[in-house]
Amino acid sequence: MQAILTIAIIIVCVLLILVVLVQNSKGGGISSNFSAANQIMGARRGTDFIEKATWTLAILLLVFSLLSTPKKSGVTESSDDTEGSITKQKAGGTVMPAAQPAQQTAPTTTPK
């Protein structure tokens, strides 16, 4: 399920990028860039379509992102979960003291 949502998020992101790039920031949008689109859909209908597509893709991205977040279960953490985190160990008071390095003794040499 997570992989499907990830793929859907990537597809929606690419489509959203393309739709936003088609828009014109000055309000001309698809009507000024593509003259054939004006003749087929009309100037206002082309802008409406692009605006609706932008909002739809943005909402889909939000929904897919919320669905892809991991679910939290009501189970409390066990001691196995805290073994990997030093911060959790310190908070739980289970930190073991660091092992002291073995003291090395100087080699004794006998005079000749």
Image: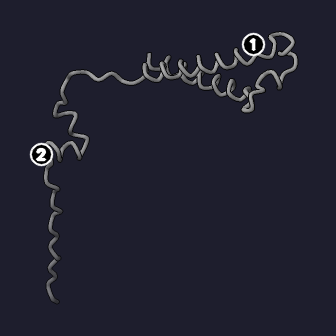
Q: What's the amino acid at mark 1?
A: Arg
**Residue 112's spot in the image, x, y percent?**
17, 89
Q: Please give the residue where the numbered disc 1 appears in the rendered image.
A: 45
**Residue 107's spot in the image, x, y percent?**
17, 76
Give the number of the mark in front: 1 or 2: 1
Choose between 96 and 106: the one closer to the eye. 96
Which mark is drawn over residue 1? none
Task: Specify whether 11 is left or right of 84.
Answer: right
Relative vertical location of residue 81 with respect to residue 74 in this rendering, above or below: below
The structure residue drawn at horizontal position 43% and vertical position 19%, both measured from the top left corner, is: 67
Choose between 24 and 109: the one closer to the eye. 24
Choose between 56 and 9: the one closer to the eye. 56
The structure residue drawn at horizontal position 69% and vertical position 19%, both measured from the top left corner, is: 50
Measured in 3D between alpha carbons, the distance from the residue under mark 1 to the one under mark 2, in whole angstroms, is: 66 Å
Report the number of numbered marks: 2
Q: What secondary structure is found at the residue carrying circle 1?
A: helix
Task: Specify whether 111 is left or right of 2.
Answer: left
Q: What secondary structure is found at the residue carrying circle 2?
A: loop
Q: Quadrant of the N terminus?
A: top left
Task: Specify whether 94 is left or right of 1.
Answer: left
Would you call the spot at circle 1 few (<14 residues within 10 Å), some (14-19), or many (20 or more)?
some
Q: What's the amino acid at mark 2?
A: Gly
- Residue furthest top in the image: 40
Would you call the spot at circle 2 few (<14 residues within 10 Å), some (14-19), or many (20 or more)?
few
Choose between 45 and 87: the one closer to the eye. 45
Q: Quadrant of residue 80?
A: top left
